[in-house]
């Protein structure tokens, strides 16, 4: 305890003590508690105190999957893993890897932890995962071979380790690289390992972020393609030299970069070309100070790709090595222009990059695949700066005040005819004021109040980036219609509701139910336990889910219906009704169905008039009941303007994020593709809608689209995924299909 008080901050000390108490209450013995006491301070010192807050919840989750001895062994080896991985983010990935192993083969974790020192001495985190997955796939049903494999006792285990090992781990040369940079530049740099090779051995490109040089956690010796002047195969370059080239290149950028380059208005090809010229400028300035750096970097410029990537390679080689043949007219031109460039002027380098992009404009280009093959250069993220919209409360106008006054005050006040919607004070009469002809001034001249604007980013597929605060949502009060129309719709479609009656009754909560096949439950499932014992006797992997629990079955579902209210919904259908009439009928039936089941639901609608005016209406919200008022709002909906779907989905996602529910469903009902008056590229709003759908899924919302467009095959599945959309061939069947779709998606 005195040692922990010296090493830990008060917040970390409190978390450390909470971990002791939590592990003690698990009932897994003293070993996990003692291991936590010993490992906590060491982990906080090596990786930062925040790692304790991430580690403790994972350990408590592991308790239901494995024994206390395995948890204790995991904690005992955690400081070793932290030192070998060298980064808190990589250590958290390592814990996720342990969670992955506990889900697939719990018996393999203990022998692997016993050999963790030998494994992390030669493997990266990605290589360790591929080695573990190979052994689990090969020996999952053979416990003896599984244990031998993860204890490094079998020949195949050592062979897979040899296949997955990389030449040099960054953690082994990290101190040497930091001393190397200090010798070159006379200052200290922070180096952080990154892991990007879970699926393959490629890893991530170097980059600079958060005041640190981020390098791959391991590198193989680099083997150049082709042969040397004597016809012999070119010699490989040691991985340590490649690490030195990467760090020297990043440090050269930091030495010459005075301020970031503005990235607004540039496409992907222009950004790549400017980055290519900036790479050459940074290296030229570094070589002017340290001439032998040219020899270090030149060894990695022997490869030439195909297409536009090959042209990038020839240009990069021509700019770094002036005496060598350029290999193409464009590279000769770039070398000549670069020779006259003022290297201390970043704007001159930017102009040359734009000229190069103009000359390459006719060639096919992919921002993901076409980049120079040189292995030491970074991804140039440190070069760019994009405008961020910041709202400073000190520069905002004072909030608008709505003051409720009497008739006398209103009549005696002088009206300011020049005041607009942004007036500092708005007077509202407490009682309705009528003119001599019997009509109220509110009906004749009043305007519906508009909520404050809400700004959302929008995805631009051409530059593969989000445009900040690009679209504006304006919520407005819905018009009131005739609630009697909703009752008429129910009477007209009474057979549909009768047909759905039994299905809806089955969806209602049914009380206590017995849940089987659980790893952590209240009592043993005798049948499952006998089956697991038989599997053990037969030498097969048993199913660890031998517990069961009685739970009270309840529905915790929230449904959002998002209606497209664009002008096209006024088009007539074959039976004479408009698309909007059928949409209202479907929503009335759906609301009645959800109301009977008892789920929380809301009905919202949207239309747009450019990115600055995305109108949004709430006909029924989650906290409101399904009554005559909600039905009147729905019946008053009108179709107008255009369909900026991505922004509406983001706003609906923000509303659903405030709802507490275990399951959230967003039903988007539309009759066409996303479109707006200020967008000519048909793919722009479709790509933005797809990104909005992905953002909704990340926060636990399931979007589903029911489209009435018979030609929607070309885009709807790309936006919502093949299983997230349905095309209704006959629009007339919408009132009966929408409640059926709800029942199918929430059963």
Image (cartoon, grey):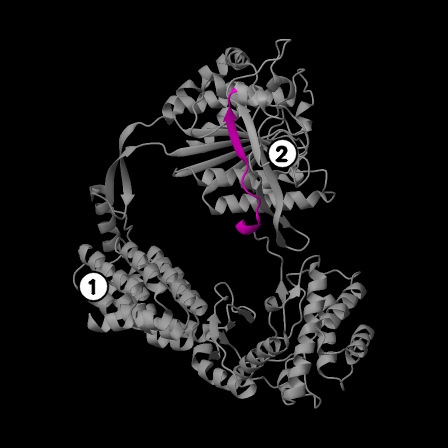
Q: Is residue 146 above or below residue 437?
A: below
Identify the residue at horizontal 67%, vertical 63% (top origin): 262
Left or right of residue 684, residue 432 in this image = left
Marks 1 and 2, Cα distance to the nearest angstrom?
64 Å
Q: Is residue 259 above or below residue 326?
A: above
* Region of the chain picked out in magenta, as a range: 393-406
Going from N to C along the chain, the mark reached first, 1 or 2, is 1
Q: Is residue 665 above or below residue 596?
A: below
Q: Which residue is mark 2?
A: 421
Identify the residue at horizontal 20%, vertical 72% (top origin): 2
The one of 87 and 237 positioned closer to us in this rendering: 87
Q: Does the magenta portion include 405?
A: yes
Tell me, for residue 536, which label it has, or none. none
- Figure quadrant of residue 359: bottom right
Please state the horizontal and vertical placement of residue 522, each as a whole percent of the image: 21, 43
Identify the residue at horizontal 45%, vertical 29% (top origin): 601
């Amino acid at each position: 305890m005195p040692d922990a008080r010296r090493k830990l901050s008060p917040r970390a000390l409190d978390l450390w003590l909470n971990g002791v108490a939590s592990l003690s209450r698990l009932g897994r013995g003293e070993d996990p508690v003692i291991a936590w006491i010993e490992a906590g301070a060491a982990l906080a010192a090596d990786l930062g105190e925040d790692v304790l807050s991430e580690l403790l919840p994972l350990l408590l989750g592991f308790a239901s999957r494995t024994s206390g001895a395995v948890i204790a062994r995991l904690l005992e080896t955690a400081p070793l893993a932290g030192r070998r991985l060298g980064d808190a983010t990589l250590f958290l990935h390592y814990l996720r890897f342990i969670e992955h192993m506990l889900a697939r083969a719990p018996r393999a974790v203990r022998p692997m932890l016993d050999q963790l020192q030998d494994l992390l001495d030669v493997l990266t985190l990605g290589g360790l995962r591929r080695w573990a997955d190979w052994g689990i796939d090969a020996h999952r049903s053979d416990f003896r071979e599984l244990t031998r494999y993860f204890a490094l006792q079998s020949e195949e285990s050592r062979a897979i380790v040899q296949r997955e090992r990389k030449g040099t781990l960054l953690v082994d040369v990290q101190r040497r690289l930091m001393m190397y940079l200090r010798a070159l530049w006379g200052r200290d740099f922070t180096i952080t390992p990154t892991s990007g090779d879970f699926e393959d051995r490629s890893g991530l490109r170097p980059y600079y972020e958060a005041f640190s040089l981020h390098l791959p956690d391991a590198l193989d010796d680099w083997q150049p393609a082709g042969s040397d002047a004597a016809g012999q195969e070119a010699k490989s370059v040691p991985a340590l030299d490649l690490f030195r080239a990467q760090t020297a290149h990043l440090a050269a950028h930091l030495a010459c970069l005075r301020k970031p380059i503005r990235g607004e208005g540039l496409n992907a090809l222009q950004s790549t070309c400017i980055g290519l010229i900036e790479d050459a400028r940074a290296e030229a300035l570094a070589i002017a100070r340290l001439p032998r750096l040219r020899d270090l970097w030149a060894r990695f410029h022997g490869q030439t790709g195909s297409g536009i990537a090959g042209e990038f390679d020839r240009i990069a080689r021509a700019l770094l090595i002036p005496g060598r043949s350029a290999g193409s007219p464009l590279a000769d031109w770039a070398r000549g222009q670069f020779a006259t460039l003022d290297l201390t002027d970043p704007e001159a380098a930017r102009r040359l990059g734009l000229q190069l992009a103009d000359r390459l404009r006719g060639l096919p280009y992919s921002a993901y695949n076409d980049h120079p093959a040189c292995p030491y250069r970074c991804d140039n993220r440190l070069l760019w700066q994009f405008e961020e919209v910041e709202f400073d409360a000190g520069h905002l106008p004072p909030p608008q005040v709505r003051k409720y006054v009497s008739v006398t005050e209103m009549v005696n006040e002088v009206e300011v005819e020049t005041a607009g919607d942004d007036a500092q004070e708005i007077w509202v009469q407490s009682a309705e004021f009528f003119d001599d002809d019997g009509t109220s001034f509110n009906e004749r001249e009043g305007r519906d109040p508009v909520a404050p604007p809400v700004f959302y980013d929008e995805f631009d597929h051409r530059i593969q980036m989000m445009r900040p605060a690009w679209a504006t949502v304006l919520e407005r009060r819905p018009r009131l219609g005739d609630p009697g129309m909703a009752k008429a719709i129910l009477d007209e479609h009474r057979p549909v509701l009768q047909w759905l009656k039994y299905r809806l009754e089955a969806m209602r909560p049914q009380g206590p139910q017995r849940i089987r096949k659980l790893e952590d439950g209240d009592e043993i499932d005798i049948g499952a336990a006998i089956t697991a014992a038989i599997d053990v006797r037969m030498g097969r992997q048993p199913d660890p889910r031998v517990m069961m629990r009685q739970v009270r079955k309840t529905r915790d579902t929230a449904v959002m219906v998002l209606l497209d209210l664009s002008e096209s919904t006024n088009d007539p259908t074959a039976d004479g009704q408009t698309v909007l009439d059928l949409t209202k009928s479907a929503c009335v039936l759906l609301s009645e169905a959800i109301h009977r089941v008892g789920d929380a639901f809301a009905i919202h609608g949207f239309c747009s008039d450019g990115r600055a005016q995305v109108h949004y209406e709430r006909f029924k919200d989650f906290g409101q009941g399904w009554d005559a008022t909600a039905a009147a709002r729905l019946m008053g909906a009108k179709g107008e303007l255009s369909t900026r779907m991505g922004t509406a989905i983001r706003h609906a996602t923000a509303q659903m994020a405030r709802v507490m529910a275990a399951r959230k469903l967003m039903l988007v009902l539309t009759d066409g593709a996303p479109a707006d008056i200020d967008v000519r590229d048909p793919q722009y709003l479709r790509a933005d809608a797809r990104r909005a759908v992905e953002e909704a899924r990340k926060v636990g919302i399931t979007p589903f689209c029911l489209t009435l467009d018979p030609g929607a095959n070309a885009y709807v599945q790309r936006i919502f995924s093949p299983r997230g959309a349905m095309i209704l061939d006959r629009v007339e069947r919408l009132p009966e299909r929408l409640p059926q779709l709800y029942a199918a998606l929430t059963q």
